[in-house]
Image (cartoon, helix red, strand yellow):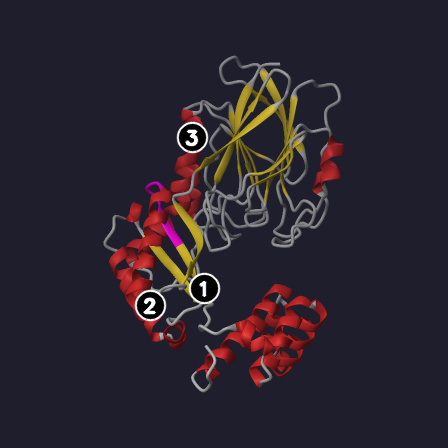
Amino acid sequence: MQPFRFIHAADLHLDSLFIGLSGVTDQVRAHLRESTFAALENLVQLGVEEKVDFIVLSGDIYDAGQSSLRAQLRFQEAMQQLEHHGIPVYMIHGNHDPLDSPKANLRVPSNVHVFGPEVEKVIACHRGTGEPVAVVGGVSYRTSSITDNLALSFTRDSASNLFHIAILHANVDGNNEHDSYAPCTRNDLFRSGFDYWALGHIHKRQVLSVSPAIVYPGNIQGRHIKETGPKGCYVVDVNEESKCSLTFHELANVRWYEEELSIDGMQTEEDLKLNIEELLDVIREKSARKMSLVRIHITGRGILHHKLEAGYVLEDLLQEIRRREALHPVHQLVWIEKIKVATSAEVDHQLLIEEDSFLGELFRLGQKAERDEKLGEEIVDSALAPLAENRHIRQLLNKMSHEDKINLIKRAKEMAAALLHDHSDLG
C-alpha cells in the first residue's frame, strides 16, 4: 500500500467567546477573540508545510447553532487556501454546528467534502500519485442532540484493502465531563473493522487505542480554565503495512495554565508580589511567544494568611500586576485570570488535635470526616441543608463532588482556627 499522511483535527469552535473573564484590557480581549481563527490559520499552514494528502475535521467547526457570519467566512477562506494547495478536506458537523442550524449561503470549495446525516464513504487519494490510499467514512449531526449510537452504522468494505478512516463526533465510554451525544463504546469501534477512528467532541487530547487507532485530538484552542495546556491536532503517518504513527502539533495562539503558589516562608506583601511575578516569568518562558492565561491557587501556611483573608490586599495586588503585565507585547503577555486563596494560619494542627478544647474537637471531627467518606458527606449535607431551600442553590449543591465537600470541611477548620487564633495561646 502507498504510504500517506493526513491531519486529524476537531472542535475548532470558531469565534467562540471567552466568557467569565474580568478586568480584561481591550488588547487582551481582541487577541482572545481572534485566537480561534489564528489556530485555524496555523492548521492550514501546518497542512501545507507537512505536505499532507488530506485533512479530516471531526465536528464542531463552529461554536453554536447560530454560527456567526464572520466564522463562516473565515472558515471558507481557510478552505480556499487548502484548495489552492490541492489539499482535500473531509469534515462532519457535530452538536454545536448541526446540519439544521442556520448558516449563510456560501460556496463550499471544491476540495471540501461534507458528510451528510447518514454514514457514507468516499475514497481519499495520495496527492502526488493520485493513487487511492484510504476509505473515509463519516456522518454529521442532523440536529444538535443526537443520542443514537452512530458508531454501529460504520462497517468496513470487506472487498477493499485500503486503510479505513471513520470520522465521528461522539462520547466514547461515557465521559462525564461532556454531554453524552452519539454514545458508544470502544468495543463498538473495534467491531467495525476500521483502522482509524477520527473522533471529536471530547476536548482533552487522548488516544483510547493504538490498534485500531481511536483518537481524540482535543480542541485546537483552549477557551477556559478547564482547557489547560497545549491544544492542537495530530499529523498521522500511515506506512505500507497500514500502521500509523501520530505526532501532536500545537496550534493554539493562547495557552491556559493552572498553577499553585505557597506562602510558606513569605513574610511580606512584597514577597508575595515577587513570587507571583517570578511564576509569570516561568510561564512566559514555557509559552514560546504565546499569550498565556493563568489561574493561581495561593496555598500554604504563614503570617500572610490573615491579610489574604481580608481580601483587599490580594485585589490591589492583582490589579497592579495586571497593569504591569499589560505593558508586555501581546505575544509575551501572561494574564492572571483569577487568584484563589486556600491558605491557613500558622497553627500547630497536631497540637490542636490532641488538645481538650472546642478547636481540638472540631479538628478531630474534621480529620475523621476526611477519612470517612460517608461521615464527610453527612456533615456537609447537614450544614448546607438550609441553603437547599433555594432551587438554584440546590442545583449547585447537587453538582458538588465528594472532593468539593471534603475541601469545605478543610476550609471550615482553617477558618475556625484563624478566627480564634488571636484569642488563644495557640500558634
For the residues bearing labels 3 and 1, Cβ distance under 8 angstroms: no
The disc label shown at residue 46, or none: 3
Task: Out of 278 and 56, give the one closest to the viewer.
Answer: 278
Locate the N terminus by quadrant.
top right
Label 2 Cα neighbours within 10 Å, binned few <14 / some 14-19 / many ≥20? few
Looking at the rendered structure, the number of numbered marks drawn on it comes to 3
Give the image location of residue 298, x and y in percent.
Answer: 42, 63
Q: Which is closer to the viewer, label 3 or label 1?
A: 1
Residue at 29 percent across and 61 percent down: it is 321
- N-terminal of the two: label 1 or label 2? 2
Task: Out of 322 and 164, give the one closest to the viewer.
Answer: 322
Residue matched to label 1: 299
Tag 1: amino acid: Thr
Task: Out of 290 and 142, give the one closest to the viewer.
Answer: 290
- N-terminal of the two: label 3 or label 1? 3
Measure how far apart labels 1 and 2 are at the Cα level. Answer: 14 Å
Horizontally, is 340 left or right of 208 in the view?
Answer: left
Name the element at disc 1.
strand
Residue at 26 percent across and 56 percent down: it is 326
**346 above or below 339?**
below
Tag 3: amino acid: Leu
Task: Out of 308 and 2, give the one closest to the viewer.
Answer: 308
Give the image location of residue 171, x and y in percent.
Answer: 65, 47
Residue matched to label 2: 267
Locate the C terminus by quadrant.
bottom left
- N-terminal of the two: label 3 or label 2? 3
Horizontally, is 300 left or right of 92 in the view?
Answer: left
Tag 2: amino acid: Gln
Q: Quadrant of residue 132?
A: top right
